[in-house]
Amino acid sequence: MRIAMLAPISWRVPPRHYGPWERVVSLLTEGLVQRGVDVTLFATADSITRARLVAVCPRPYSEDPTLDPKVWEGLHIAAVFERADEFDLIHNHFDFLPLTYSGLVRTPVLTTIHGFSSERILPVYEKYNGRTYYVAISQADRRPQLTYIATIYHGIPLEEFTLRREHGEYLLFFGRIHHEKGTAEAIEVARRTSLPLLIAGIIQDHAYFERAVAPHLNDQIRYIGSVGPDRRDEILGRALALLHLINFEEPFGLSMIEAMACGTPVIARGRGAVPEIVRHGETGFIVNTIEEAIEAIRRVPELDRERIRRHVAEHFTQDRMVDEYLRVYETILRQHGSR
């Protein structure tokens, strides 16, 4: 089985700190290689992989503003499809644009839809619906007008995360700094409970940061920047709870399963995929308001951190994700062969 893995080029594979799509691509690619699958990874030239690496873009364009994203995206996608005959399957993690190449090649194309940036991109998915294959990353992110071959939750390697049985000392916000992710709401919860709050993540919306975050930073509420793999386990594991008070229909949310892998409970708004990931009263609490979040913090000592980690081991491991994608690949190749 020869797989072409098409990664985004906004960040390196695996990312140095932020880059959830690139992180999933890395985990899947390395897991497939470990199973003996012949994988060619199309990613930035500084990417690290045991697969065969093909790179057109020298560096991630989010790290180098001199690179024009549209130029390098066009060259990057073309590099895969110009070699389509070398592969049994092209696995696209690059959103909707590669679909417009799919009718030009005989090789089947599978797209993992990592979320919809806007409903305006749906016409592209609708045009190629039934002509290519789609995987959803949660039931919540499915669109009724599209046909999916599977829903496959993201998975992580448990060995990268340490179970800490004692409840932590601080609240944690872990994600991009943006209204969608609820940074201001996390600050409000910290202020009203007088608990320390660590804020970790890239500043995606600088105006929002200056307006809603920066004025509240002090000894109690601290912004520590974007946290990479070298610090992720400790920062997540030593938290009392992860505050995930999102303001949008999030398609998945890697930080939730990473926190739970450490035994850290998640307090999250029940939007998007949250109810599929967090078990209310068992691995955290699903809330609707700031008041409910504050009450949930009081109930954190009721939770068993070992049970929280076990939930991830049962549902959100890298091995389970790789197994499910292999089954999808085999199904596609059977269907494509019968055509």
Image (cartoon, grey):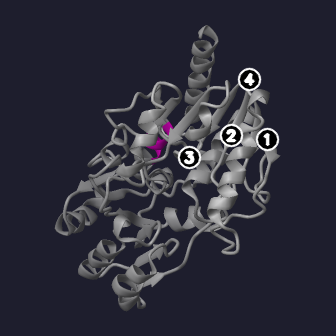
Mark 2 near mark 1, Cβ–Cβ under 8 Å? yes
Q: Distance between the residues labelled 4 and 2?
A: 12 Å
Residue 117 place in picture, x, y as percent: 42, 54
Magenta stretch: includes residue 297: no
Q: Nearer the viewer, mark 2 or mark 1?
A: 2
Q: What stretch is highlighted in magenta?
A: 309-313
Marked residue nearer the N-terminal end (2 or 1): 2
**Residue 234 in picture, x, y percent from top left:** 57, 66
| Between discs 3 and 1, the one toward the N terminus | 1
Mark 1 is on which residue type? Ala
Residue 276 picture quarter:
top left
Question: What's the mark number on residue 5?
Answer: 2
Mark before the other along the chain sequence, 3 or 2? 2
- SS at mark 2 in the image: strand
Q: Name the residue under label 1.
A: 51
Q: Where on the picture, by quarter, is residue 247? A: bottom left
